[in-house]
C-alpha cells in the first residue's frame, strides 16, 4: 500500500484562525478523501478530491469552510477556515488503493481549537 | 438512508479465544465490504476486504459475508492482547468509491 504522510500531526489554534493540513502520497493516486473523526466516533467524510476537478463535498460541509486543493496526483490540502472549538477533531486523509474501492489512511492531524 | 450498523461494545474476549465482530448494512445491492482496525490515537488500518458470499481467510482473520441476510462478520482466532482495538466496518454501496462507515466495535482481549 502507499505511504501517506500528513502535516501537521497536531496543532492548537485560536478561534477565528485557519489551518491548512497537507497530505502527501508516495505514489500517484486518482482519488483522495478527507475525513473528520470526533473523539470516540466513527469517520465522517468531508469531501472527495480528484486531481483536475473541484472537490465534491458531503452534506453539511461547504467549500468556504473547508477549501480543498488537489494540484497533482500525489498531494492534497484541506483548510479549516474561521475555526471554532466545534472544529476540534482528528482530520484524516485517505487514498484510493490498487483495488478501486479500498482506502488507505494517513496518520491524521489532531486539531484543537481554543 | 444508507447505514452500516455495528454493536459499539466493548466486546471482551479472553486471550486465545475467538472474537466475533458483526456488521449489518442497509443496501442490498452493496458490493464491497471492508474491516479496518483502529488503535487508540492511530488512524484506521485496512485488515480485510471481501466481495463474494462466503468466507475469506487471512492468517488469524476470517471475513464472512452473507448478502442475503445483509451482514458481514470478522472472526479473529487465537485472540491476542494486541488485537485490542476498535474495529470499523465499511461498505461500498453505490460504486462511486465512497465508503459508508459503521460506528465501530471496541474489542478488548483480556490476558
Image (cartoon, coloured by chain):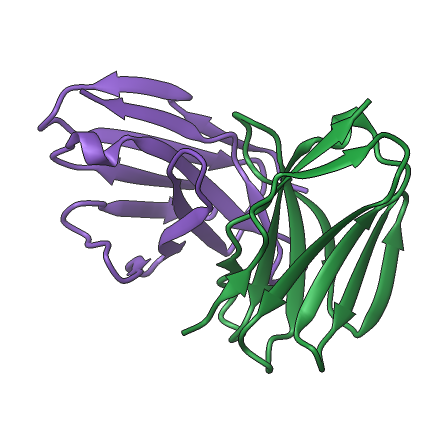
Chain colours: A purple, B green
> In terms of image quadrants, where is residue B5?
bottom right
> How many labels, in total?
0
Left or right relative to A23: residue A80? left
The location of residue A10, given as percent across then percent down, is 37, 20
Q: Residue at x 45, y 29 (%)?
A: A6
The location of residue B94, given as percent across then percent down, is 51, 75
Q: Residue at x 45, y 71 (%)?
A: B2
Q: Residue at x 46, y 50 (%)?
A: A32
Left or right relative to A8: residue B69? right
Residue A98 seen in render: no
Give the quadrant of the N terminus of chain B.
Answer: bottom left
Q: Residue at x 39, y 50 (%)?
A: A44
Residue lying furthest top: A12
* Vertical side of B72 occupied by B18: above or below: above
The location of residue A96, given as percent across then percent down, is 56, 53
* Vertical side of B48 occupied by A8: above or below: above
The location of residue B39, given as percent across then percent down, is 61, 30
Left or right relative to A11: residue A109? right
Give the quadrant of the C terminus of chain B.
Answer: top right
* Vertical side of A85 occupied by B95: above or below: below
Residue A8 seen in render: yes
> In terms of image quadrants, where is residue A86?
top left
> In terms of image quadrants, where is residue B108?
top right
Amino acid at each position: 500500500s502507499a505511504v501517506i504522510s500528513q502535516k501537521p500531526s497536531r496543532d492548537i489554534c485560536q478561534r477565528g484562525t485557519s489551518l491548512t493540513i497537507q497530505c502527501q502520497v508516495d505514489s500517484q493516486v486518482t482519488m483522495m478523501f478527507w475525513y473528520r473523526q470526533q473523539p470516540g466516533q466513527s469517520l465522517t467524510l468531508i469531501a472527495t478530491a480528484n486531481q483536475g476537478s473541484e472537490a465534491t463535498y458531503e452534506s453539511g460541509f461547504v467549500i468556504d469552510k473547508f477549501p480543498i486543493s488537489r494540484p497533482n496526483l500525489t498531494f492534497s490540502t484541506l483548510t479549516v477556515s474561521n475555526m471554532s472549538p466545534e472544529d476540534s477533531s482528528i482530520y484524516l486523509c485517505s487514498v484510493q488503493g490498487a483495488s478501486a474501492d479500498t482506502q488507505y489512511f494517513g496518520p491524521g492531524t489532531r486539531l484543537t481549537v481554543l | 438512508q444508507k447505514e452500516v450498523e455495528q454493536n459499539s461494545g466493548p466486546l471482551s474476549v479472553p486471550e486465545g479465544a475467538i472474537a466475533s465482530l458483526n456488521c449489518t448494512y442497509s443496501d442490498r445491492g452493496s458490493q464491497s465490504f471492508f474491516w479496518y482496525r483502529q488503535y487508540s490515537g492511530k488512524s484506521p488500518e485496512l485488515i480485510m476486504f471481501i466481495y463474494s458470499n462466503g468466507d475469506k481467510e487471512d492468517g488469524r482473520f476470517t471475513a464472512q459475508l452473507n448478502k442475503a441476510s445483509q451482514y458481514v462478520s470478522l472472526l479473529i482466532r487465537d485472540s491476542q492482547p494486541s488485537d485490542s482495538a476498535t474495529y470499523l466496518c465499511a461498505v461500498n454501496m453505490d460504486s462511486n468509491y465512497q465508503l459508508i462507515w459503521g460506528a465501530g466495535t471496541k474489542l478488548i482481549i483480556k490476558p
